[in-house]
Image (cartoon, rainbow, N blue to C red):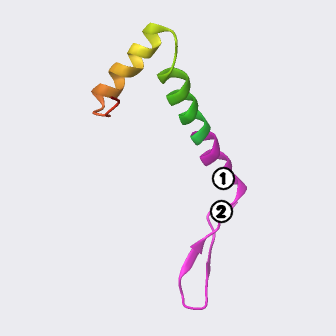
Amino acid sequence: MNTFSTKPEGDGIHTAALTASRVVPIFMAALLGIFIVGGVGFSRIEAVHNAAHDYRHSMSFPCH
């Protein structure tokens, strides 16, 4: 199974083909990231929000 194929163009430059086996994991990772940032970062549960806030600070991510 070849998920990363290249094919030469007229000028010798190779291009990568995006197949469904590559697009689906990328899309799912993006959805998971949006859920974590949106769901946990804006959570009304104080303990969950504070844990996410402390983790962002420990990773040197500016959040405010």
Check whether the beta carbons of the residues at disc 1 and disc 2 lie within 8 A of each other. yes
Q: Is 5 one of the magenta-colored residues?
A: yes
Q: Residue furthest bottom?
A: 10
For numbered disc 1, what is the local secondary structure? helix
Residue, disc 1: 23
Residue under label 2, please give it.
18
Residue 8 x %, y %:
60, 83
The residue range painted magenta reads: 1-29
- Front-lying residue, 42 or 15: 42
Find residue 64 and report its image quarter: top left
Residue sitting at 52 percent across and 11 percent down? 44
Q: Amino acid at mark 1?
A: Val
Percent position (x, y) of residue 61? Answer: 32, 34
**Image side of residue 3 versus residue 50, left or right:** right
Q: Quadrant of residue 59?
A: top left
At horizontal 43% and vertical 8% (from top left) the residue drawn is: 47
Q: Within 10 Å of the Cα at label 1, are there few (<14), some (14-19), or many (20+) other Cα atoms?
A: few
Left or right for 55, reference 49: left
Taking depth in this image into account, of 4 and 25 the one nearest to the observer is: 25
